Image: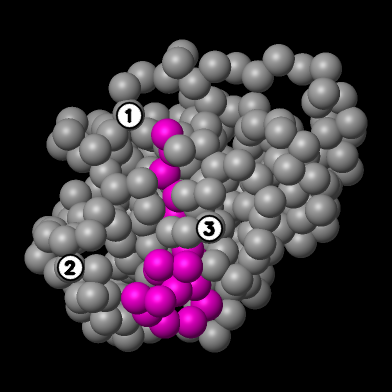
Amino acid sequence: MRLTTAKVSLSFRCAGLVVALISVLGLMSGCRFVSSSALPPDRLNGFPRLILWVWERPEDLEFLGSRDIGVAFLAETLTLRGEEVVYQPRRQPLKVSPTTRLIAVTRIESRKTTGQSIALNDTQREKIVSLVLKTLELKNVAAVQIDFDAVVSEREFYRQMLQDLRQNLPNNIPLSMTALASFCVGDRWINDLPVDEAVPMIFQMGADDHAIKDFLTSGHDFRVPLCQRSYGIDFDEQININFDHSRRIYAFNNRHWTENNVDSLLQRINK
């Protein structure tokens, strides 16, 4: 999920997945969904149902006050380049009430340089884990989330990194990840990752957009149990689904959050 101050530019460009996804959706009506009851306990239980995503821009959310709304904010961007991990901390101010529950988001990007592929080695993995753990030192942070649009060749590296991170996190700290919606419908590679949730991104899905939205509005559910604990939506995109009130909703807004649009969002998801 590559979100910027100007626009959302998600990396939903997996052409091979599109063909596979359409085939899966055609068969889905005859498939039985795996129950989320098979999942381990959710460390995010007790967190607010609505969580606002805040990316790299100045944001004043003090108006939330004591309202039961959380904030997942971009804390750092880590870029895999060659054998390096390039660290970029958050540079924009964020104002929140002292009572607001915060989730520190680490965005991971991969960038090949001319003539040099990405190493995906142990040193890079260890550095990422160390930098994510440091976000727990930020004030009021109660959970961490990883945002990495890993391509097929990066999945094993990602899996091992999440395993190392989970082992080093305090047991009571939740670990969340974002997920392409296509992973949650027709691709099981995230099934057994050591996270508390995989947030399906059901906005700006590129070639998958209509197929997945039609699938959800027809009353179907995500097949991967980890994707059955939350939704990821865009404030500006309408999707006519009945939101399961037991699930968390992460909402992105391409503009500044205001009290009015938070109230509007609450009305939409509580219908």
Residue at label 3?
268
* Identity of the residue drawn at 65% across and 45% down: 241
Real-space Cα separation, disc 3 to disc 2, in angstroms: 21 Å
Q: Which mark is residue 234?
A: none
Please tell me which residue is depicted at 40% across the width and 67% down the height of the picture: 263
Q: Crowdedness of circle 1 by 10 Å Cα count: few (<14), some, many (20+)? A: some
| Amino acid tagged 3 | Arg
Alpha carbons under labels 2 and 1: distance apart: 26 Å
Whole-number angstrom distance, CA of label 1 to CA of label 3: 25 Å
Q: Which residues are magenta?
A: 246-265
Query: Is 161 drawn above or below residue 193 in the view shown?
Result: below
- Mark 3 or 2: the one toward you: 3
Amino acid type for the residue under numbered disc 1: Asp
Say what secondary structure mark 1 lies in. Answer: loop
Q: Position of residue 140 (x, y in %)?
A: 13, 59
Identify the mark nearer the N-term, 3 or 2. Answer: 2
Residue 263, magenta (yes or no): yes
* Image quarter of residue 170: top left
Q: Which residue is mark 2?
A: 65
Q: Position of residue 120 (x, y in %)?
A: 49, 50
Question: What secondary structure is found at the residue carrying circle 3?
Answer: helix
Residues marked 2 and 1 touching at CB (< 8 Å): no
Task: Locate residue 58: give its quadrant.
Answer: bottom left
Compare marks 1 and 3 and give the one earlier in the sequence. Answer: 1
Residue highlighted by disc 1:
42
Question: What residue is drawn where x is 49% and y is 21%?
Answer: 36
